[in-house]
Each structure stands twice: as C-alpha cells, then as structure tokens.
Image (cartoon, grey):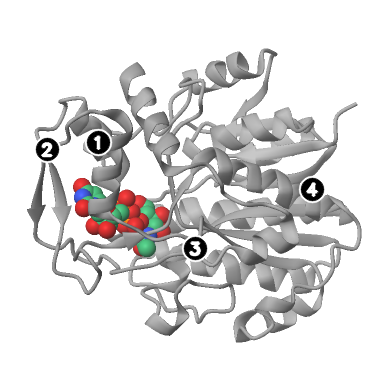
Amino acid sequence: MGKGKILLTGAAGYIGSHTWVELSQAGYDVVGVDNFYNSERDVIDRIGKILGKPVTFEEADCSDLKAFGKVFEKHPDIVGAVHFAACKAVGESIDKPLLYYRNNIVSLLNLISLMTEKGKKANIVFSSSCTVYGQPDKEHLPIAEDAPLKRSLSPYGKSKQMAEEILSDSVIAFPHLKVCALRYFNPIGAHPSALIGELPRGVPQNLVPFVTQTAAGIRDHLNVFGNDYNTPDGSCIRDYIYVVDLAKAHVKAIDKLLSDGCGNDAQVIDEPTYVEAAKTGRWFVFNLGTGKGLSVLELVNGFMKATGVNLPYEIAPRRQGDIEQVWADPRKAERELGWKADTPIEDVLRSAWEWQKTL
Ligand code: UD1
C-alpha cells in the first residue's frame, strides 16, 4: 500500500523528474503528466530505470481543461498535486507573454478547479521562485519568507507572483484546499545515476549548463556577466541548490499537507497579500535554498577544482535585468518541514559534469 496518489505536472522536466524519483522512493504513487513542450519523452523511461519499476504517465497539456480533466477521471484517487508545468525563461517571456500566461496561469486555474471539484480533498504544492522578491534591499539578505515582494518586470516573474495570489485567494474560497508554495533559489546539478538532469534546448541561458557545455568543448568560453557589481569579487551572487535536495523538499511539503492539522503559517502573516490566507492555516510558503551565497567566479573556480577540468571564461558586460545578489534564509523550511539542503557544492558541481558527459 502506497502513501497516496500524487499528480505531478511537468513531470518530465528538470525539477519534475527528480521530484518524481524522490516521491516514488518515499512511498507515494506518482502519476506523471507532461506534454513534452520543453522536455524529452525518454525521460519517462529513465525515471522507470532509476526506480526499477513501471511508472504511470499520462500525456496531456494542463492548459487544455478537457485533456487535463481526463487524467482526473482516470485517477479519481489523487490526493495531492505538485505543479511544475510552466515555462521558465525570463527573456523568452518578454517576447511571448501570452505563451507564459497561458502555460503558467491557465494551467494553474485548471489544476485548482479540477482538484477542488466535488469537495474533494485538495493539496497542492506549487513551484514558485525567489524571483518574487526581485532585488531585495541589503537589510533583507538573506531572504526570509516575510521579506517584501517586489513587482516583477518580466511576464515570467509576474506569472509566479500572480500564481501565488491566485492560490492564496483560492485557499480562502475553498475550505478543503491546502497549498504550499515553494520559492526556489537556483537549482543545479543532476541525479547521481546520471540518467536525468537539466536538458537545455539550444544555447543554455542558465549558468551551470553553460559551464558544463563549455567544459565539454561545445562552447569555446563562458561569459561571466559583469565583474563590477557591489559584491566582494564583483560578480553576481546566487544561492545554488542541489536539485536532488530540492526534490526532497517536495516530499516533505506533501507529507506536511497530507498530515492533519498542519498549523498556522505565522511567518507570512506580515505580508499584506497573504494575511487572510495565512489565517486559514492552509497556506504555507517556504524559501528553498542553502543559505549560502556564491558568486559566479566562485562557482567557476569551484567547478574547475571539483572536476579538474579547465573552464575558459571571459569577463563580459552585465546581462540586462540581472539581480546583483540574492540568497535564502532557509531556516523556516528546516524548522517546519524538517528539511535542509546539505549536499556539498563540489559534489553538486561534479554531478552536473557527470551528467554533461553522458549527453
Ligand atoms: C533567474 C531567476 C530565476 C528564474 C531563472 C530562470 C532571479 C534572481 N532568478 O535566475 O527565478 O527561475 O532566471 O531562468 O531573477 N551568468 C553568467 N554567464 C552565463 C549565464 C549566467 O555569468 O552564461 C550569471 C548571471 O549573470 C547570474 C548567474 O550567472 O548572475 C546565474 O544566472 P542564471 O543561471 O541565468 O540564473 P538567474 O538569472 O539567477
């Protein structure tokens, strides 16, 4: 007997695939859903290989209510959902806002209505982002969950903010809905099996896939975007979190929502947007990071040290729209979820390199 059936949308994606493995290994029955808009079909077989058993997968577009509804008809015993299905490239979202709002907002609306239909128990873990904080003022670093939210400039960032607002409004409206919004910092690395990992299409936009492709000789050098920021070595600072550690936080979040009486979320009470939602005791927000900021140059040097591979890089102009520095205060997740990201960064960077070598 499993611990319950969990729907995973965007299940073939980077974080989705790692979370599938962890949920399943923790005893949940996972129903994966994806439309392969930004992922590959063979990821499903690879997940089966890691788990050593057949997996349950339904191909559907979550923004298509009818198609998505069929998944619920087929699996009426779903007790919770982890919602990853979304587009995630900041730059692309500026060129294609409607794509972002359709995929990120319409999918979420469909999920909430299908989950809350007929008064069923509805538990949703939502894939949010530290982008909701924008560039925080120095006094708010490291960022805790009650730091002010700053209006995002990109449709991608706005879609994450809107999604959190839609979810918190829904918690107030549906007494049987519980939601946990997880605000990720920068997920990196790959599964130790090297069977799943990040699969960027075309030229990678994110730092670590560009690093590993450069190390592999696919790109001739890495551009470090800016060394004149107000940081110790002049390059931007982020909180890089191992994707497997991140995946494990989703298991803890589902465990929490499924347990009865999960208690009030006191720490978001200060946030005007969420005051009423937090009072319900069914709305939770967690920052998921390591609590340590790492600069781009530190990451580049750390990669070379961890792998012994040379990484040619050049200092380039700043990238437009980049945030100077941001890292998490993850203590609330440790306190309330019993979760901590503790994989050493050298191991994380090596896992990214092992994955790159298999590609
Ligand atoms: C941003 C968002 C994040 C979003 C992600 C999606 C913030 C704080 N984070 O991540 O919410 O989910 O985009 O893509 O807004 N860099 C280089 N050279 C490169 C690539 C990157 O120097 O070739 C630097 C960037 O300037 C940045 C760091 O590496 O300082 C990390 O960049 P990236 O991996 O793109 O992530 P974010 O921009 O932090």
- From the top left corner, tell me how far across and down residue 317 is, in percent: 9, 61
Above/below status of 230 relative to 122: below
Q: Does the residue at mark 1 contact the one at mark 4 (Cβ under 8 Å)?
A: no
Q: Which mark is residue 255?
A: 4
Mark closer to the observer (2, 4): 2
Mark closer to the observer (3, 4): 4
Above/below status of 154 relative to 13: below
- What amino acid is labelled 1 in the image? Met
Q: CA distance from mark 2 to mark 4?
A: 44 Å
At x 55%, y 38%, the residue is 244
At x 44%, y 75%, the residue is 141
Q: Does the residue at mark 1 contact the one at mark 3 (Cβ under 8 Å)?
A: no
- What amino acid is labelled 4 in the image? Asp
Q: Which mark is residue 160?
A: 3
Above/below status of 325 relative to 353: below
- The reply to whether residue 65 is visible in this rendering is yes
- The reply to whether residue 137 is visible in this rendering is no
Decide which of tag 3 and tag 4 comes sooner along the chain.
3
Disc 2 target residue: 312
- What amino acid is labelled 2 in the image? Pro
- The local secondary structure at tag 4 comes to helix
- What amino acid is labelled 3 in the image? Lys
Q: CA distance from mark 3 to mark 4?
A: 23 Å
At x 79%, y 54%, the residue is 256
Mark closer to the observer (1, 4): 1
- Disc 3 Cβ-to-ligand 1 distance below 8 Å: yes
Decide which of tag 2 and tag 3 comes sooner along the chain.
3
Between residues 280 and 62, which one lies in front from this camera angle? Answer: 280
Q: Total number of numbered labels?
A: 4
Decide which of tag 1 and tag 4 comes sooner along the chain.
4
Q: Which mark is residue 304?
A: 1
The N terminus lies in quadrant: top right
